[in-house]
Image (cartoon, rainbow, N blue to C red):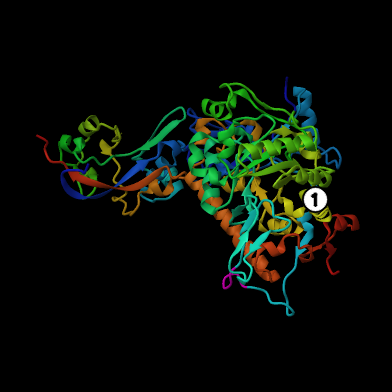
Amino acid sequence: MKSYLLPEFKIDREEERCIRCRVCERQCAFETQRYDGELERMFSDAEKCVGCQRCVIFCPANALSVSSNQFAYRLNYGWTRERISDLKKQAETGGIILAGCGNDKPYRIYFDHIVLNASQVTNPSIDPLREPMELRTFLGQKLDSLALELEPGSEFKDVEIKMELPPTVMIETPIVFSAMSYGAISYQAFKSLAIAASGYGTLFNTGEGGLPKDLRAKYWKNAIVQCASGRFGVDAEYFNCSTAVEIKIGQGAKPGIGGHLPAEKVSYSIAETRMIPEGSDAISPAPQHDIYSIEDLSTLIYALKEVTNYEKLVSVKIAAVHNSAAIASGMVRAGADIIALDGLRGGTGAAPKIVRDNVGIPIELAIASVDQRLREEGIRNRSSIIAAGGIRCSADVIKAIALGADAVYIGTAALVAMGCTLCQKCYTGRCSWGICTQDPYLAKRINPDIAARRLMNLLRGWSLEMKEMLGGMGINAIESLRGNRDHLRGVGLQEWELDVLGVKGAGE
Amino acid sequence: MGVEGVFRGIMRRIYCKEEVCIGCRLCEVWCRIEHSKSKKVLKAFLYEKERAIQRVQVEERGAVSFALQCRHCEEPDCVYSCISGALYKGNEVVMHDTSRCVGCWSCVLACPYGVIAMDEVRGKAWKCDFCEGVGREEPICVEKCPNEALRLALVLEVEHAESE
């Protein structure tokens, strides 16, 4: 069928700068660039271009530029270029339109409508370069009360804790790498996250694809291992090679939708890690078929605690949806040590575009409503909240924590640090940056040494910025900011939005 | 077990980490630029009459690739085979004086790595000079490798005692 789709990008090659070195041709995973030996010049097929900018970055002569193709359908507010393209694509294929990355639609980003406070005159700000500033965060249950035994007359010298303390996990900065499985991303990218997490003293999340055997000895202390609906790579040893176990109920990019790692990506090593036959489809069902209620969830949580000898935290991850607050309350009561909330803008390797763009609620509102509900019920101390989905910078982290989160998950931001340009073609498995691919030729493009360095730089940079912001507010520990919404003010928000966020309007 | 023999020095060598060499061939591009007259990208490739020759070659099959340049052998067959004395062992590396090269290609035949390039136009052989010829501290291929596949390493060079 003749395709009626217009090319999305335009490739401009300055002919007098092109040295015909063919670097662009080799770097493009979509075969957009082509060398003609007879004419001794390069040609580009713009219709294949995904706009990932790999060729532009690698061109040693700066001869290339790739820009959005400003093709001219008649301007129409409702029938946008994207709507028309999707209609044509669907008319040609009759299928579900897939997409990678997170929701790119202009839903209100509440982080951008919240401003932070700073100390002036009546209270001193703190200079983080001269005074200690604490970003350390402890994840896990905090006790309602502590039973101490005191020797009579010993004047608090021999105080002993008379109860068993629940496990907690210390992280150096309240930023954790979110779940990205080996299979969804390349081994190299996966390993980079592990190296960076262990180097900086934070955690990475294995996603539901298991934890490769060769990474266990070195990185288990920094691993959150996931137990999702597909139960891939799951056994007692796997659960114990971790610092926390996460039950994945849902994902922000595709709430209510399962996953599918196509057979062609299931290489020998992925098959071994996931414990499935090589070259078979890895399908994660939409629900966990043993969890249809809070009671069922509790059963699984305690099964996992049992198998890990009550030494590991158990986290439950849900997509932020309409009833998150009530669901979260149930999760806490079911025994979850961590509640992970994944918002509307959370990323994915592949999801139906229609779901990615239309399902879920913004993470800012979810954090606020969950934190509020748990406080009202007096159970906020029983779980930590990790917020995910659309954390783009250190200010977002600060705002998320002030709204009530304990820490945040970053996925997209980490991938961007490694090279990702959000071209949204993750689902093709042809990532030119070597991240979302299992093709050995492409996966080599991530050198774990470099990528881990980039990730650690990102964590360091954000942490320094967070200290600056905290100092400005006159706070010297992230603990003091948690749920401290007095430090936030809304700008350009309506009454109901301020209500849900629990934030006053600016000037109030 | 120690290494037996006479210590001769610490030598710098270029190594390629095959598992992260992405076959982009930017090493080849930059080698050629660095060894050109102008050392400018566009001039070197498009305008210089005397085309500079790259001294590094990426070997590639499927997903496996690595950049290969002169290994600067301890016992260089190329030097032994050279009939005009153009190839000689310098301080650290095997050097080539192109003005003395007669283009007999003996070195090309002798090199076990196949890293000596034949320039049939000028009738001369070309090989990696560790960028000493262009006055660089660090070879350009190592500096420009985008994925840090090419690295400079220090190796101990030892003259082995004859075993009995």
Q: Is residue A80 above or below residue A370?
A: above
Residue A398: x and y in percent read 70, 59
Q: Please identify the quadrant where the N terminus of chain A is shown.
A: top right
Residue A456: x and y in percent read 54, 53
Which amino acid, mark 1? Val
Residue ID for mark 1: A370
Q: Is residue A130 above or below residue A72?
A: below
Is-magenta flag for residue A128?
yes
Is-magenta flag for residue B73?
no
Left or right, A218 with respect to A160, comes to left
Residue B119: x and y in percent read 30, 35
Q: Please identify the quadrant where the C terminus of chain A is shown.
A: bottom right
| Residue farthest top in this picture | A1
Residue in the foreground of this view, choosing between B79 and A35: B79
Residue B41: x and y in percent read 44, 47
Magenta stretch bounds? A127-132
Left or right, A457 with respect to A340, comes to left
Residue in the foreground of this view, choosing between A245 and A10: A245
| Quadrant of residue A297 within the rendered picture | top right
Residue in the foreground of this view, choosing between A134 and A51: A134
